[in-house]
């Protein structure tokens, strides 16, 4: 199925851009007429993925974060969030709730658990030294249903 | 993202506002911990009334303050948590700590949900 609309965003992995990126994605998604709750879920999941790029992907370096969002005719949204950072050596381990490699920052280790709870699908691909791509998918229910 | 702290007879009330994310969490925790430690208070109330957004960085913030108050032999609780924020807190298991919207009575017993916080009122 081809998307009916696409948005691409790229920005420097500075923490101040966490708010910018989740707000920009939410603004794009608004055209599907989501509920406040759906919009809040999407903002939260995007914030988790972008924070991972900045805190883990580009730890101690400044890199670029890439987002591609697609809207499909069946009101499905996919949001791909990619970095060209360190990559994740063990994705299964990284996705375990409470696992974190950055406890000193008071990271709860719940980023992936939050994404999985709030989205319909979360796909993670990663290559050490090359980067990580997280794809979030969520269907927007029509408000009449 | 901002926090305003107020001290009332051994109780620090921290009123958070705006978005709580990774970018803003550090200054928030420094301000709250600073107010608790400087005052010697043993009770901490985090007021979420004006918080518009929170991701798992907010969970880290709440758990970190919970641990601090435990270490100090005190207690902390949250008030005015909107439903969309509570959703993230519940999936992190914060409801199991029974700190969500729990009024504390002056006799130290747990109040009923919705009951005014007697300690708080007495302090005012």
Image (cartoon, rainbow, N blue to C red):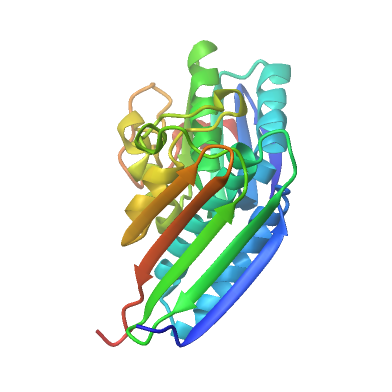
- In the image, is A78 to the left or to the right of A55? left
- In the image, is B62 to the left or to the right of A90? right
Front residue of B82 and A138: A138
Q: Quadrant of the N terminus of chain A?
A: bottom left
Percent coordinates x, y for residue A11 in the rendering: 71, 60
Front residue of A72 and B14: A72
Percent coordinates x, y for residue B83 in the rendering: 40, 57
Q: Is residue A81 above or below residue B47?
A: below
Q: Is residue A89 above or below residue B54?
A: above
Front residue of B105 and A44: A44
| Residue lying at 66% horizontally and 40% vertically, measured from the top left | A58
Q: Quadrant of residue A28?
A: bottom right
Percent coordinates x, y for residue B67 in the rendering: 50, 20
Say whether residue B52 is visible: no
Say whether residue B96 is visible: yes
| Residue lying at 33% horizontally and 52% vertically, measured from the top left | A117
- In the image, is A8 to the left or to the right of A31? right
Q: Quadrant of the C terminus of chain A?
A: bottom left
Front residue of A120 and B82: A120
Q: Quadrant of residue B15?
A: top right
């Amino acid at each position: 199925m081809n998307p009916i609309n696409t948005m691409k965003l790229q920005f420097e992995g500075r923490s101040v851009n966490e708010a910018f990126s989740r707000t920009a994605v939410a603004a794009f998604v608004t055209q599907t007429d989501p509920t406040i709750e759906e919009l809040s879920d999407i903002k939260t999941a995007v914030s988790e993925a972008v924070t991972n790029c900045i805190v883990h992907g580009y730890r101690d370096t400044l890199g670029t974060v890439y987002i591609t969002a697609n809207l499909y005719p069946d009101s499905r949204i996919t949001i791909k969030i990619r970095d060209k950072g360190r990559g994740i050596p063990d994705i299964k381990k990284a996705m375990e709730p409470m696992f974190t490699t950055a406890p000193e920052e008071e990271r709860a280790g719940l980023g992936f658990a939050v994404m999985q709870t709030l989205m319909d699908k979360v796909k993670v691909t990663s290559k050490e030294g090359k980067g990580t791509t997280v794809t979030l998918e969520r269907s927007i229910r029509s408000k009449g249903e | 993202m901002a926090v305003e702290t107020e001290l009332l007879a051994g109780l620090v009330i921290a009123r958070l506002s705006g978005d709580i994310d990774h970018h803003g969490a550090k200054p928030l925790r420094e301000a709250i911990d600073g107010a608790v430690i400087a005052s010697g208070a043993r009770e901490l109330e985090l007021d979420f009334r004006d918080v518009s957004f929170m991701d798992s960085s907010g969970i880290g913030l709440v758990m970190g303050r919970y641990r601090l108050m435990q270490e100090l032999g005190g207690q902390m609780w949250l008030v005015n948590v909107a439903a969309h924020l509570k959703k993230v807190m519940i999936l992190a298991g914060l409801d199991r700590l029974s700190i969500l919207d729990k009024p504390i009575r002056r006799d130290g017993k747990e109040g009923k949900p919705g009951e005014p916080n007697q300690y708080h009122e007495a302090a005012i």
